[in-house]
Image (cartoon, grey):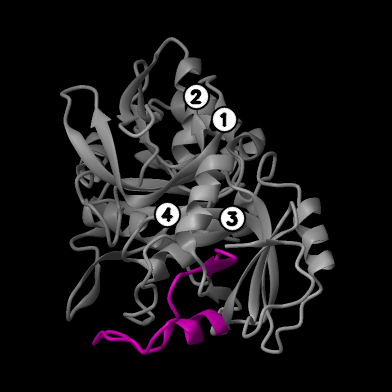
Amino acid sequence: MADAKPAHTPEGATGVLVLADGTCVWGRGFGAEGDATGEVCFNTSMTGYQEIMTDPSYAGQIITFTFPHIGNVGANPEDIEATNAHALGCIVREDVTDPSNFRSTQRFDQWLAANGRIGLAGVDTRALTRMIRAKGAPNGVIAHSKTGEFDIAALAKKASEWPGLVGMDLAKDVTTAQLYDWRDGLWQLGQGYALGEGDDAARPHVVAIDYGAKRNILRNLVAAGARVTVLPGTASTEDVMHHDADGYFLANGPGDPAATGDYAVPVIRAMLDTGKPLFGICLGHQMLGLAMGAKTIKMHQGHRGANHPVKRLADGRVEITSMNHGFAVDIDSLPDGVKATHVSLFDGSLCGLELEDYPAFSVQYHPEASPGPQDSTYLFGKFVDRLR
């Protein structure tokens, strides 16, 4: 898989992943040229690579796809979670081929180049994944040069000097710059994205705090019957209360939750004090935990994929879920008044919580998975029903 400080570029190599310890993983570069530094993780999803690359939660990360055939359905302007790609780059086993899907409008490598993101193909992704599982997610630099010329020492220096995600507040970098109303509903074949039906004034009003919100979360809120106003993750208590909403939603996002919590937690506490319903997903789940006095921890390798089994403690039901997180709420730190509702069947980590004295709940996984398992979409209905 790798050489430790190789003397020269292997024949035919136009891309490389250089880890902080100097290890080089060579391959064939595609997409944009240049280099990018971040945390190297892996995702086990078989589909949805465009949604994954545009998910703001992947800011600061380089994704290793464990499924070997990435890019074979091409790219299109609909299957995106944000206007821009937020993952820094991707590592795949097989070369990107011509797309084979009637919805495709562009090759995946062309889409990456247009979005300024780097790809690396021809890599033994199984070996790289096993290394991450054994040693944890390393810092690294992904680089692409059509000439095959690289300054490995300089790239290794970048990787070793990158501070890592612990202590890093990335939500402020990916959040919206200003508030807006969201109206799109769910996508349907031949119809595109639906608009919310009925009188907007009759719909319960949700203020969604954008720490890096996926569009499909907002679409599911609309489909469940809500009217949605999105505010920046840095919104003040006064900004939030100005809207006199029926309830509050805390979105997903990247980075260390403890760092984002410095400014988010006081606002969330004010939301809870209104007694109105609150729902959080992913980073929003972690923010709710922090607001109640729990602690968050950096995971060894994180959870990223569309096939993670989660147990619902109330009745023992198992939900297959989509996940994307490298931090978690420490289940042993939950204070009185906060109960665990879901746990991972992979490692027992906390995947859901509910407050006993407030109408608030949250989950670590993504019930809006699109594409992905839809076992947990009922949570949007549960939240909107509480609003009513």
Q: Where is residue 226 in the image (x, y as percent from the top left)?
A: 28, 51
Residue ID for mark 1: 297
Residue ID for mark 4: 229
Q: Where is residue 96 in the image (x, y as percent from the top left)?
A: 43, 82
The quarter of the picture where residue 185 lies is bottom left
For the residues marked 1 and 3, what is the alpha-carbon distance in whole angstroms?
18 Å
For the residues marked 3 and 2, what is the alpha-carbon distance in whole angstroms?
23 Å
Magenta span: predominant SS is loop
For the residues marked 1 and 2, what is the alpha-carbon distance in whole angstroms?
6 Å
The amino acid sitting under disc 2 is: Asp
**Disc with the residue nearer the chain's start (4 vs 1):** 4
User: Mark 3 or mark 4, which is nearer to you?
Assistant: 3
For the residues marked 4 and 2, what is the alpha-carbon distance in whole angstroms?
31 Å
Q: Tags 1 and 2 in contact by the CB under 8 Å rule?
A: yes
User: In this view, which residue lies farthest toward the top?
Assistant: 336
- Mark 4 Cα-neighbour bin, 10 Å: few <14, some 14–19, many ≥20: many
Taking the spot 59% from the left edge, 41% from the top edge, the residue there is 135
Q: In this view, does 239 lie to the left or right of 370?
A: right
- Mark 1 Cα-neighbour bin, 10 Å: few <14, some 14–19, many ≥20: some
User: Mark 3 or mark 2, which is nearer to you?
Assistant: 3
The amino acid sitting under disc 3 is: Val
The amino acid sitting under disc 4 is: Thr
Determine whether 38 is above or below 152 in the image. above
Taking the spot 36% from the left edge, 42% from the top edge, the residue there is 365
Residue ID for mark 3: 40
**Disc with the residue nearer the chain's start (3 vs 2):** 3
**Disc with the residue nearer the chain's start (1 vs 2):** 1
Residue ID for mark 2: 330
Placement of the N terminus among the 4 image quadrants? bottom right
**Disc with the residue nearer the chain's start (3 vs 4):** 3
The local secondary structure at tag 2 comes to loop
